[in-house]
Image (cartoon, rainbow, N blue to C red):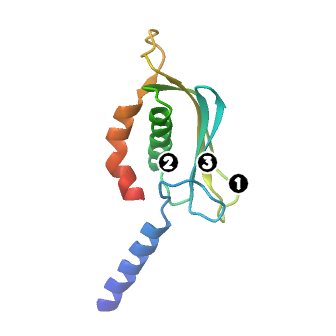
């Protein structure tokens, strides 16, 4: 019985240790974000997750990074212009990549058909989740 408990504790520890953290991406990491400024108020934001990262978690990490960039750039809102998710062909590793191009704005769009995000609300909503990922 004691051996089973130790075994399951070790497996849980390894799985938690393998989850994608909230951090900048580097080649030998377990994943993370990368972003590239494409114009004054536009960024391409990417999040690299490993196979243990759920689609929902990956999306949360991507939205949080987009909101963080928006606030750091002194804007209030962002609009997702384009988004894409890429799953690697290899079954033996590789990163799942989700990316989006965002345009940062200071005022809510007048067009009600445009979906936008309040950057401070996104940060507030996901703050605890992100803290658990670090």
Q: CA distance from mark 3 to mark 2?
A: 8 Å
Residue 125 lies in quadrant: top left
Mark 3 and mark 2 residues within 8 Å of each other at the beta carbon? no
Disc nearer the start of the sequence (3/2): 2
* Quadrant of the snapshot with the C terminus: bottom left
Residue 117 is situated, as x and y percent measured from the top left of the image, at 43, 27
Q: Would residue 101 be found to the left or right of residue 67 on screen?
A: right
As drawn, the residue found furthest toward the left would be 1
Residue 73 in view in this figure: yes
The residue singled out by tag 2 in the image is 58
Instruction: Please identify the quarter of the rendering in which residue 131 is found.
Output: bottom left
Q: CA distance from mark 1 to mark 2?
A: 18 Å
Count how many numbered circles sit on residues in the image.
Answer: 3
72 or 38: which is nearer to us?
Answer: 72
Q: Position of residue 82 (x, y in %)?
A: 61, 29
Earlier residue among tags 1 and 2: 2
> Which label sits in the foreground, 1 or 3?
3
Q: Which mark is residue 97?
A: 3
Of labels 1 and 3, earlier in sequence is 1
Q: Which mark is residue 76?
A: none
Viewer-closest of 96 and 44: 44
**Residue drawn where x is 48% and y is 62% of the image:** 19
User: Does residue 73 appear to the left or right of 123 in the view shown?
Assistant: right
Mark 3 element type: strand
The residue at the point 35 percent across, 85 percent down is: 6
Residue 83 visible, this angle: no
Are dots 1 and 2 in contact, CB under 8 Å?
no
Pinpoint residue 88: horizontal percent, then vertical percent. Answer: 67, 53
Under circle 1, the secondary element is: loop
Q: Which residue is mark 1?
A: 89
Disc nearest the viewer among 1 and 2: 2
Question: Residue 41: horizontal and vertical position, in percent?
Answer: 58, 26
């Amino acid at each position: 019985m004691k051996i089973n408990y130790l075994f399951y504790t070790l497996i849980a520890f390894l799985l938690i240790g393998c989850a994608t953290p909230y951090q900048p991406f580097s080649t030998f990491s377990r994943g993370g974000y990368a972003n590239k400024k494409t114009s004054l108020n536009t960024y391409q934001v990417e999040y690299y997750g490993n196979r243990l990262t759920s689609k929902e978690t990956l999306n949360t990490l991507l939205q949080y990074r987009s909101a963080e960039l928006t606030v750091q750039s002194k804007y209030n809102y962002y609009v997702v212009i384009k988004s894409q998710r890429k799953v690697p062909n290899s079954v033996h590793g590789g990163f799942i990549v989700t990316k989006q191009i965002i345009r940062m704005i200071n005022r809510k769009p007048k067009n009600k058909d445009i979906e936008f995000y309040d950057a401070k609300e996104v940060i507030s909503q996901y703050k605890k989740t992100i803290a658990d990922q670090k």
